Amino acid sequence: MDMVKQVKAAHILVKTEKKARDIKTMMETGESFSAMARKYSDCPSGRDGGDLGWFGRGQMVPDFEKAAFAGVPGDVLGPVRTNFGWHLIMVQDTK
């Protein structure tokens, strides 16, 4: 049974899957998630390193929420497609 009630996460939102994959590749070579969010994210949260804070079920669009709640702290998930675009999601904590 899934006992995760809330997730603390950050994300990077871009227009294309290719851009999301390119950013994820840059992070795999040492770039920080928050720096990449500040540089590339189309979401206003980008200026805060992509920080979305804590959220519970039903607060995010379904595909985003499904990915975030399936992750464990430290995971960078995605690209995940929603009606907003393509997301990379970093799970920071769960409770």
Image: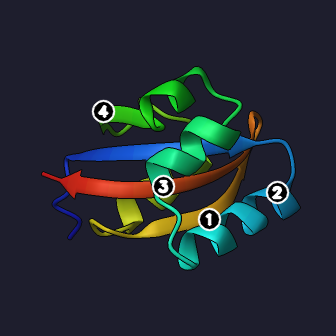
- Image-based side of 87 in relation to 28, left or right: right
Q: Secondary structure at mark 2?
A: helix
48 or 68, which lies in front?
A: 48
Residue sitting at x 45%, y 37%? 49
Three-letter amino acid code at disc 3?
Phe
Question: Callout 3: 10 Å neighbours few (<14), some, many (20+)?
Answer: many
Residue sitting at x 59%, y 55%? 88
Three-letter amino acid code at disc 2?
Lys
Mark 4 or mark 3, whichever is nearer to me? 3
- Image-based side of 61 in relation to 3, left or right: right
Question: Which residue is farthest bottom?
Answer: 29
Q: Secondary structure at mark 4?
A: strand
Q: Contact (CB < 8 A) between labels 2 and 3?
A: no
The residue indicated by pointer 1 is 78
Three-letter amino acid code at disc 4?
Gly
Residue 31, position in %: x, y? 53, 64
Q: Contact (CB < 8 A) between labels 4 and 3?
A: no
* Figure quadrant of the N terminus: bottom left
Q: Mark 4 or mark 2, which has the lower sequence index? A: 2
Measure the C-alpha gap from mark 3 to mark 1: 13 Å
The residue indicated by pointer 4 is 53
Q: Which mark is residue 33?
A: 3
The residue indicated by pointer 2 is 19
Q: Mark 4 or mark 3, which has the lower sequence index? A: 3
Q: Is residue 56 above or below residue 45?
A: below
Measure the C-alpha gap from mark 4 to mark 3: 15 Å
Q: Mark 1 or mark 2, which has the lower sequence index? A: 2
Q: Secondary structure at mark 1?
A: strand
Q: Mark 4 or mark 1, which has the lower sequence index? A: 4
20 or 57, which lies in front?
A: 20
